[in-house]
Amino acid sequence: MDTKDLLKKVRKIEIKTRRLSDHIFSGEYHTSFKGRGMTFSEVRQYQYGDDIRAIDWNVTARYNEAHVKVFEEERELTMMLMVDISGSESFGSKNQFKKDIVTEIAATMAFSATQNNDKIGLILFSDEIELYIPPKKGRSHVLRIIRELIEFQPKSHKTDIAQALKFLSGTQKKKAIVFVISDFMSQDYEQTLKIASKKHDITGIRVYDIREEKMPDLGMVSMLDAETGAIELINTGSKAVRMNYEKKYLDKVNYFKETFSKSGSGVVNTRVDESYVTKLLSYFKSR
């Protein structure tokens, strides 16, 4: 893609996603996340109407009188966008690839954070960390993130979500709002998610295509594995083969939902041909 085409594409995504973030998401984002970043301010005597959950029992025991912790809302938060750019993201059957929707979602979230004067950082991952952009503020920074989402070419086509979460925990020492955007065709990340979610407010956004859910009966077909590059001859006419495919697919989907829910992280599922706007708004309002 030459520079002119790239800039045109960046501008097109900016116009669409900025409008969404300006008119729809920034208010919901502020309501859902702004109050979550709280820093300790002081301890004072308990007053009628104070939340009893804020009682500092150590200080209360020391003075033999109820004291509560006072927190202040952090003026700025950090949003980390963790985006899966493995081979399976290039799949699409409805005139749009999964990675196109992933880019739009990431751009919308980034502009929403900008509206609240928050920092935005980016982690592009496959089974390794492909690119890390440290959190910064501003429109030009968001446009750089969009450019990378559009044109970055990964070295690997495989997926390792655990590796990406480990990197997040190692680089982000302060609490961040984290969106992991992927098709989650990966497993074995339960432990790293558990550790990361103790510090960060994490939401998994699963972007998928309707054609991935079931294998069609097309007889003997040569199929390419987008993540390994292997080509196999598959008998799609076999009911057992189709059922086995569906089971493996559902196992990964259920693993994603259960693992994120168990760790206290948020879960959003959006299909390529559905409105991600509706799905995200519904999620923000439910928090």
Image: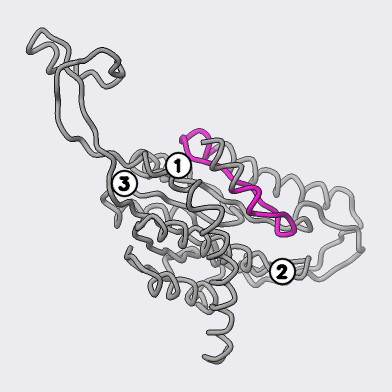
Q: Is residue 275 magenta?
A: yes
Q: Measured from the top left, where is residue 204 in percent x and y? A: 53, 48
Between residue 222 and residue 176, name the one nearer to us: 176
Quadrant of the rendering where the N terminus is positioned: bottom right
Identify the amino acid type marked 1. Answer: Thr
Identify the amino acid type marked 2. Answer: Gln
Residue 19 left/right relative to 121: right
Q: Measured from the top left, where is residue 176 in percent x and y? A: 35, 49
**Relative to 83, residue 149 above or below:** below
**Highlighted range, magenta:** 259-280
Residue 34 left/right relative to 158: left
**Residue at (76, 70) in percent of width and height:** 95
Question: In this figure, which residue is indicated by the disc labeled 3?
Answer: 175
Residue found farthest to the left: 63
Nearer mark to the viewer, of 3 and 1: 1
Please report whichever mark, 2 or 3, sits nearer to the chain's N-terminal start.
Answer: 2
Question: In this figure, which residue is indicated by the disc labeled 1?
Answer: 31
**Residue at (59, 48) in percent of width and height:** 280
Between residue 39 and residue 260, name the one nearer to us: 39
- Badge 3: how crowded within 10 Å, few (<14), some, or many (20+)? some
Between residue 111 and residue 145, name the one nearer to us: 111
Identify the amino acid type marked 3. Answer: Lys
Residue 72 lies in what quarter of the image? top left
Q: Measured from the top left, where is residue 132 in percent x and y? A: 37, 68
Please report whichever mark, 3 or 1, sits nearer to the chain's N-terminal start.
Answer: 1
Question: In this figure, which residue is indicated by the disc labeled 2?
Answer: 96
Q: Measured from the top left, where is residue 97 in percent x and y? A: 68, 68
- Badge 1: how crowded within 10 Å, few (<14), some, or many (20+)? some
